[in-house]
Every structure is written in structure tokens, then in C-alpha cells.
Amino acid sequence: MAERKRLSAADWTGEAYRALAAGGVVAVAVEALAGRLGATKGSFYWHFTGRDAVLEAALQHWERAETEDVIALVESEPDVLTRLRNLLTIALGGHPAYRAGGVELALQATAGHPLVAPVLARVTHRRISYLADQFVLLGFDPTDARQRGLIAYTAYLGHAQLVHATPDSAPTGPGLQAYVDAVITTLSRP
Amino acid sequence: MAERKRLSAADWTGEAYRALAAGGVVAVAVEALAGRLGATKGSFYWHFTGRDAVLEAALQHWERAETEDVIALVESEPDVLTRLRNLLTIALGGHPAYRAGGVELALQATAGHPLVAPVLARVTHRRISYLADQFVLLGFDPTDARQRGLIAYTAYLGHAQLVHATPDSAPTGPGLQAYVDAVITTLSRP
DNA sequence: GACAGTCCATACGGTGGCGTACGGAGGTTC
DNA sequence: GAACCTCCGTACGCCACCGTATGGACTGTC
């Protein structure tokens, strides 16, 4: 962390991404990032034009890593129901790759920010659409499928919020799996 | 708003509360509040010892107004199922008194803040406990009741987040009532 | 080993928010 | 109406953060 090595733009973006998840937009501060990376602003302003640039890069990284990459990951599973179960299990924290929904929660306080709003809107629409597609594949008509996709997504958002704000209130381990099962069986029932 | 009248501590607390819901903890800035109230910092520092004081007051106001007051409101309804329906309808935005969950969402980015964390924990535990109590009254055993209370609460949180971040994605009007019905009938079914 | 290009530290000016000091306006009491 | 208390505006110092300017260290090339 304080290796005194040369830094790349990706290093700064990665640190900004962590700051974004931890403290939201306001935590993406140039000098704070420099301190964590063991560097100074001189390095930062060589790689980026300004604070907004690294903020935008971090937001784009989030959009790709926690939406498209996850969808691509679960798409390898052919069975729709199993795919949904895998998706929810990953999203709700079963996969230790990254904390469930840390970024979108940190973004809530600044949802109207000119750089945040469009990304948030794209991510939300994409996720709900993908969920609705799965329910269409399960045989529900488009309107019903969208309604069920919506409920599934709010269940994800709510659980993520609970985990983030008060971890001791949220179900873990077997309780979490039961939660996932309850959501899936409920939503796949006609 | 620019009436040039004398201000009370409650005026500052109310403005801080609105700022809290709109932009989170960072939005509770003394000079910003003063600007909205048509006053200056000189007034503020007569009523409060500092920024933390008004922030704490706003958090306490939220804790009371959006938890205990709402519980007291729905407690007048004797039938448990109707009471749950009323509660969810109010909580999900049917009641125009205040935006659904605006504050807790704005608090997410600073959930670890020393003044925020304890309030957030108390509110979460109180709400989940109350929901679980209702399911106990419906005849479920305590463990099952808590699980259902948890799901109901995550549905609330998720919906609130959706409304706040991307309003065009969330159900409104009849779609909202259908959403409430779906959640309640699902959770009250053995 | 000189040279050019890449990357970064230091130093500085500008801005915005916090908190304090102090004086004055407006109402109250006798 | 004079003293007094309540409330608030103005002015100031302080700190955190942004962005710029500039010189230098490091690396590869011939």
C-alpha cells in the first residue's frame, strides 16, 4: 500500500471506487485518495484532469462490474430457476467478491448528482429488465413479469440496505439462504 | 421563508431535518441552513453549540416522527391484517405527510457516523420488532414471525430506495396498491 | 552518458464551511 | 425611559479541499 511504486490511472480509479462504496461521492477526495495510495496530488493531476474525472471513472467501473459482469456470470447457467437462485445468492452477499450493494447505497444521498443520476438510472433499468426477462422465460406475461422483477429487485435493495446499516439485524448463513428461498418460491408461484 | 421573524431552535431543527432528507449528513451545513432561513450563523450559534447539536436534534426528530408516531397512528386499527395494510400503505408513500424513507436513504452513505449509527440501529430494531409482533398476533411462531417481519421491512426499504433513486422505475397509483397487496398476501400466507 | 519522455513531490493561491468575538437592534420590566 | 435580556448580523481566523505551476527523479534509448 505504501510501496512507493509508480501508479496508474487504474490504481486511482480503484481507490476512488473503494472510497465511493465506503463514504459516497463526498469521500472521493483527491488528497484523501493520495494519502491512501502513499502519493500526493501531483501524481493524481497527471493521470486525471480533475476530481470529476476519477469520480466518473469509478462510477463506470461500478456499472460494469456490478451489473453486466454479474449478468454475464449467471448467464452460463441454462436453467432459469437455478439462474435466478444463483443471481440472488450472489447479489445478497453469498459471493464474497464484493459487498452487496455498497455503492448504490452510498450513492443514495447524492442520487441527483449530475454524474451519478444517469449511471444510477441505467443500472436500475438494466437490472429490472433482466429480472423481468427471467420471469418472462418462466412463462409469465410481460406485465406480470415486470411486476415480479420489481419485487425481486426491491427485496435485493432492502436486504442490501439492512446489511449495510445494521448488520446484526440481517439474516446470515442459513437464515440468508432461507430468505433467498422464500423470495424465489414466492415470486415463481403463479 | 424570508419573513425576517425571530427564529427558534425548532426552526433550525426543522430545516436541518429537510436538509438531512435531501442530501444526507453533509447537507446539514450551518451556513446553508442559515441561507434557507434568511438568517446568518450568528442566529444559529445562539441556539446551538455547534453543527453536531443540530444534527443530533434532527436525527432525534426523525426517530420519533417516522417510527414511534407512525406506530401510534396505526395502533388505533384493531384488526391486525388491516393494520399491516395501513402501515405498509403509509410507509410506501400513500400518505403524503412525508416522502417514504427519504432520511434513512440519505443516511446510508454515513451509516458509520458516530451520531448516525446508534439512531439507525434503534430505528431498525424497533421497526422490525413491531412488524414481527404483528405476525405473532397473526398466529405465527416467533421465529417465523421475525423472518416475515424482516422480509416486509426489506420490501419497504427496497421500494423506498427505488422511489428515491429512479422514480420512473417504481410502481405508482394502482401499481403501488397491487405491490402492497402482493407483499401482504404473500407474507400472511402460511 | 547524454537526452527525452514519463511520472511525481513541493509549494502556492483560491474557495467554502466551521466556530468565535463583538456590537447592535428589538422587546421587556421597573 | 433606562436598564436589561434576548436574539442576530458582521467580521475575523482557522482548516480542508481543489486546482496550478514548477522543478526534479526515474526510465528507456541511442
Image (tube, coloured by chain):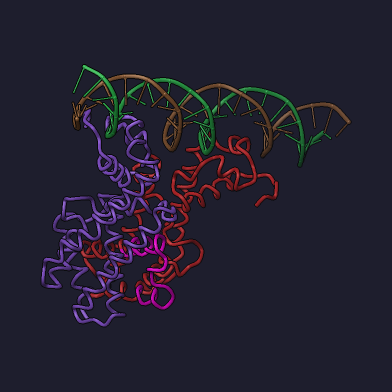
Chain colours: A red, B purple, C brown, D green
Is A176 included in the stretch rendered in magenta?
A: yes
What is the quadrant of residue B87 in the picture? bottom left
Q: Is residue B57 left or right of residue B77?
A: right
What is the quadrant of residue B49 in the picture? top left
Q: Is residue B112 visible?
A: yes
Q: Is residue B105 left or right of residue C18?
A: left
Magenta highlight: main SS: helix
Residue at 55%, 37% (x, y): give it: A48
Residue B168 horizontal/vertical position (percent):
25, 49
Q: Nearer the viewer, residue B14 or A65?
A: B14
Q: Is residue B4 left or right of residue A128?
A: left
Quarter of the image where the C terminus of chain A is located: bottom left
Q: Is residue A190 visible?
A: no
Residue at 29%, 66% (x, y): give it: B126
Residue at 61%, 35% (x, y): give it: A46
Residue B99 horizontal/vertical position (percent):
23, 50
How many circles with numbers are drawn on the protein? 0
Q: Is residue B157 above or below residue B110?
A: below
Is A81 included in the stretch rendered in magenta?
A: no
Residue A148 horizontal/vertical position (percent):
25, 65
- Range covered by the magenta-colored residues: A155-180
Q: Is residue D17 above or below residue B150?
A: above
Q: Nearer the viewer, residue B111 or A171?
A: B111
What is the quadrant of residue C24 in the picture? top left
Q: Is residue A79 left or right of residue D14?
A: left
